[in-house]
Amino acid sequence: MNTFHHANIDGHKIFYREAGANSAPVIVLLHGFPSSSHMFRDLIPKLADIFHVIAPDYLGFGYSDQPGA
């Protein structure tokens, strides 16, 4: 099951998707430009049977904070 979270990093909210058992080996899915963790929406459930999957949105992308210039 996919869950959605925010982490506070240096005063900015960073959105991330998470799935899989906490005891499983961790895999972090980093997206390319310009995209967000949404691009992994079909891959995450397939990996979650084996891995603890974390897919963050970079600052300025997806559901993470969009700080001003």
Image (tube, helix red, strand yellow):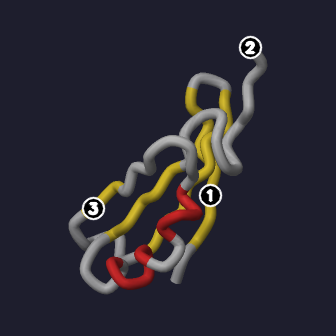
Q: Tag 1's secondary structure?
A: strand
Q: Which residue is mark 2?
A: 69
Residue most extreme to the left: 25
Residue most extreme to the top: 69
| Disc 1 from disc 3: Cα separation | 16 Å
Q: Position of residue 3 (x, y in %)?
A: 58, 71
Return the disc, 1 or 2, that comes first in the chain's sequence.
1
| Disc 2 from disc 3: Cα separation | 33 Å
Residue most extreme to the right: 68
Depicted 38 relative to depicted 66: above or below: below
Q: Quadrant of the C terminus?
A: top right
Q: Tag 2's secondary structure?
A: loop
Which amino acid type corresponds to the residue marked 1 in the rendered image? Answer: His
In the displayed structure, does residue 63 sit left or right of residue 20? right
Q: Which mark is residue 67?
A: none
Return the disc, 2 or 3, that comes first in the chain's sequence.
3
Q: Position of residue 20 (x, y in %)?
A: 39, 77
User: Going 25% across and 72% down the picture, which residue do you hit?
Assistant: 24
Q: Position of residue 51 (x, y in %)?
A: 28, 73
Q: Which residue is mark 1?
A: 5
Q: Which residue is mark 3?
A: 26
Which amino acid type corresponds to the residue marked 3 in the rendered image? Answer: Val
